[in-house]
Image (cartoon, helix red, strand yellow):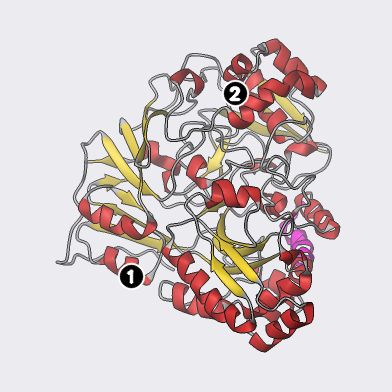
Amino acid sequence: MVAGGVLLLSACGGNDSASKPAASGSASAPATAKTISYAFDQEFSSYNGNTSAENAARNNQPLQRVLTGFWYYGGDGAVTPDTAFGTYDKVSDKPLTVKYTINPAAVWSDGTPIDCDDLALSWAANSGKIKGFSTAGTTGWELTDAPNCEKGGKEITHVYSEPFADWRGGLYSQGQIMPAHVVEKKGNISEEELIAAVKAGDAKKLAEAAKFYNDGWIMKGTLLSEDLIPSAGPYKLSKIDAGQSLTLVANDKYWGTKPTVQTVVERYIALDQQAQALQNGEVNIAAPQPGPDVLNQLNALEAVTVKSGPQYFFDHLDFNFDSSPFKDKNLREAFAKCVPRQLIVDNLIKPLNPEAKILEARITSSVQASYPDIVAGLGGEEKKYDTVDIEGAKALLEKAGKTGLEVKIGYNTPNPRRTSVAQLISDSCNKAGFKVKDNGAEDFFGTGLANNTYDVALFGWTGSALISGSTSTYTTASKCDSEHKGNNNGCYSNKKVDELLKKANSTVVEADQTPLLAEAEKIMWQDLATIPLYENPNLTAWSEGVENVVPNPTQAGIGWNMDKWTIS
């Protein structure tokens, strides 16, 4: 899920290698040289992916070149300034002070300048300092005061109340700057009034604007009118075909480098059907869920490039601490004892990555240099649940008087691998006395996860190397509802973890962050906050004639540079 202070974790549902020609099939290039289509498994639902409920890859990935900002994740996963939008520079270390300057030429696609009120709205919505706005997380924003600009201003300076290690990947990323003039119109407030209300922290004055910001951009299979969804990037939204596709077209008002192709179409195609869709020419680019069968299918295609590699994307099990029996730690422990983590990795991940292992941490990826040191600092807590212990789980259930407890596992469908994960868990945990129910649903992210209608949630976090991206996921929520819980969907809470993560965010030297993160991870293992399972390898394929496709290891996904794609 992507939002908050930095680009936070985004909920989602080896070496590079090129495929070899084979006689079993080939991928044709669909459409014309002015159109490129790519496959995605979830349907777009909101122009605003910053709220707690709508902060998901289904919204944020296709909008990356529609709602631009001061920075984005480049092809190597690094924070990359977007100089077309503007510049930002650190002007002081003590106190940390960062100056942001919007490009004088920057305008929304309806001709409205991008300026002070847009940044003021972004700060109001994400800082957590003005009640009424829903946000997925406030990390970084909460350390700053309101923008110090006036109507029409293109420059602001933020002074941080304390050091913030990830300031480069901090405020005003792509996707976080929304059109304030639209909110002003729908919220019955003038530009001057909005800026003044943000500076004064006047939640009452901003109440109507906040309501539109939270809910006014949600779409249910129909594109909102063009005046409500202006673009600040090389593409703009053009059409939604409900259940089928989202179409983007070049933004003729974009002041930067024009996109190479006129039209990009995101086609909604289930993960288990994307390889076939590529072969059939329904799409030019696919990023299906990695699995041995789909990899073999892709490698059997002629004229197709296939690449795989590591990415910041892991699957996990989250307990519902708000309204399920798993508020009881003994029951969480019983369940953790019967989850067959090693079997899941062996059956579903190792066929793609023979070196795959059980993931032992939540905040740090195994490809990061600090991962071994963080795991070493866990004191063995992470190893307690590497091996299935049916008898131990059964004993805990019996002691709690909960033998026969029904457990609803929620996840987004269709998702073949997660269906297999749920089945493996069911086969194992039912032997211990649980009654595991597969509660997968197509709208799980929008309803089940947001409203806590599950006992255990099975889904993926896709993020980056920024430690602050995970903060809101494990920090105590002010209230366990869709407006306040941010990425902490299950509403886990431990004040010591809160303190450690806050301290890590303000620790500038990366080596000094490691013991803090290790201690936080150790406590989360003791609490059984979540159960990390495995890391998802990246798998991307595209047809002959398509160029400049660069798989991104972060939550940005395949569409991060769609304006640079070409097709012959």
The vertical placement of 227 against 278, above or below, is above
Q: Which mark is residue 55?
A: none
Q: Looking at the picture, which amino acid does disc 2 mark?
A: Ile
Q: Is residue 353 left or right of residue 198?
A: left
- Of callouts 2 and 1, the N-terminal one: 2
Q: Quadrant of residue 329?
A: bottom right
| Main secondary structure along the magenta-highlighted residues | helix
Residue 450 at x, y percent in the picture: 62, 47
Categorize mark 1 by other alpha carbons within 10 Å: few (<14), some (14-19), many (20+).
few
Of residues 423 and 272, the one drawn nearer to the viewer in this rendering: 423
- 198 vs 405, nearest the viewer: 405
Placement of the C terminus among the 4 image quadrants: top left
Q: Which residue is mark 2?
A: 102
Badge 2 marks a residue whose secondary structure is: strand
Q: Are marks 2 and 1 in contact (CB under 8 Å)?
A: no
Q: Residue furthest left?
A: 23
Whether the magenta-drawn stretch holds residue 107 is answered as: no
Q: Neighbour class for label 2 at 10 Å: few (<14), some, many (≥20)?
A: many
> Going by the picture, which residue comes out furthest to the bottom?
391
Q: Which residue is mark 1?
A: 293
Count of numbered circles on the image: 2
Who's the residue at 54% across and 52% down the image? 444
- Tell me what residue is drawn at x 57 percent, y 64 percent: 409
Q: Is residue 42 left or right of residue 531?
A: left
Report x, y in % for residue 456.
Answer: 63, 63
Question: What's the magenta region?
Answer: 507-520
In front: label 2 or label 1: 1
